[in-house]
Image (tube, grey):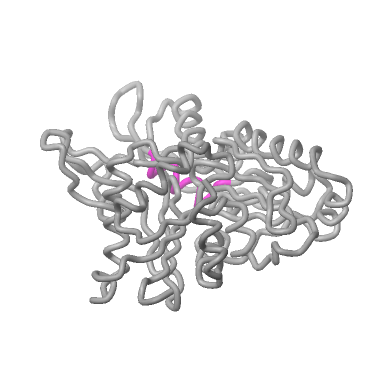
Amino acid sequence: MGFAQDIGIDLGTATVLVHVKGKGIVLKEPSVLAIDRDANEVLAVGEEARKMLGRTPGNIVAIRPLKDGVISDYEKTEIMLKHFINKVSKSKLSKIFKPNIMICVPCGATEVERRAVKNAAEKAGANRPFLIDEPIAAAIGAGIDVSKPRGSMIVDIGGGTTDIAIISFDGMVVRSSIKTAGDVFDEAIVRYMRRKHNMFIGDRTAEDIKVNIGCVYPRPNDISMDIRGRNLLSGLPRSITVASSEIMEALEEPVGVIVDAVMKVLEKTPPELSADISDRGIIMTGGGSLIYGIDKLIQERTGINVIVADNAVSCVALGIGKVLSSMSKAERKLYDTEI
């Protein structure tokens, strides 16, 4: 479309991925800003801000401008978007021709929340901002042809939300968006360590535990890792060894919420599409789908084959890129005016 650059953004609660037409995914950074509270000034964005977490004076705090997949701090989201857009738009032409930007939103986002995302993108420098529902983008990124009149089921577990949808003929027939996802997993691990070991750990440590030894289904062999935190009784630093079976216990409740949500969507699915899903299976995307055994657990509960997509973390960004790159002028107009 002229000289305007096409950019797709997976604006996640935990991570931002940016896809540029012709280049693929060019940026993947935490959706975090480091703020000087005294001066009310943004000191760092993304990976640079993440490195400052827990290692700075009290006046410097890290904030996430998105919560549960939607904007919680409009001004900081605009700053973050502008930073990432400038980072990937380095050509001279990009300074003259503003980019066309497509951003994903949770399928349960309200009209007000969708408008906030569009406005933030416009203020951050978008020529024309487009929105796409997360399950649609995830399905396309996973290689599913959503234009066919046959049922496909997507379970996308991100940082702030889990989006579940039955997709057919370019639309969502049944959908659900719940605020139980990767961040809630981390919180559950922090609470477990406090309750079981009288130990306080930070969010970064909880995430490391989740990624390295986290599981929601019994592993063939229990694995463990050494972690460090603060003893709540003495207030002194402490190291302990934690087993994966303990983390399975810690995550039992939040994972149960996700499995129940999957079951409810299946219960509302029309019989013809249910037959398609039984044949084709359930596709899982998002970083949360990589935790050990979540596919096995859902398969056991539903009796339906569950497949974790290739490049699960990148599916949404890849899908956004594919849609924006292939959209006709008429389709661009449709996405542009859908809210």
Q: Is residue 240 above or below residue 320?
A: above
Q: Nearer the viewer, residue 156 or 8?
A: 8
In the rendered image, residue 241, in percent from the top left (x then y), is placed at 47, 42
Residue 34, magenta (yes or no): no
Q: Residue furthest top?
A: 233
Q: Residue furthest left?
A: 39
Q: Is residue 128 above or below residue 196?
A: below
Residue drawn at the location 36% of the way across and 76% of the way down: 3
Residue drawn at the location 69% of the way across and 51% of the way down: 295
Q: Is residue 122 above or below residue 18?
A: above
| Dominant secondary structure (helix, strand or loop) of the stretch shown in magenta | helix
Task: Determine the image quadrant of residue 13.
Answer: top left
Q: Is residue 294 above or below residue 170?
A: above
Over which residues does the magenta segment extend?
203-214
Name the side, left or right, on which 139 lies relative to 166.
left
Residue drawn at the location 28% of the way across and 65% of the way down: 87
In the rendered image, residue 61, in percent from the top left (x then y), is placed at 23, 38
Q: Nearer the viewer, residue 107 or 36?
A: 107
In the rendered image, residue 34, in percent from the top left (x then y), is placed at 23, 45
Residue 207, magenta (yes or no): yes
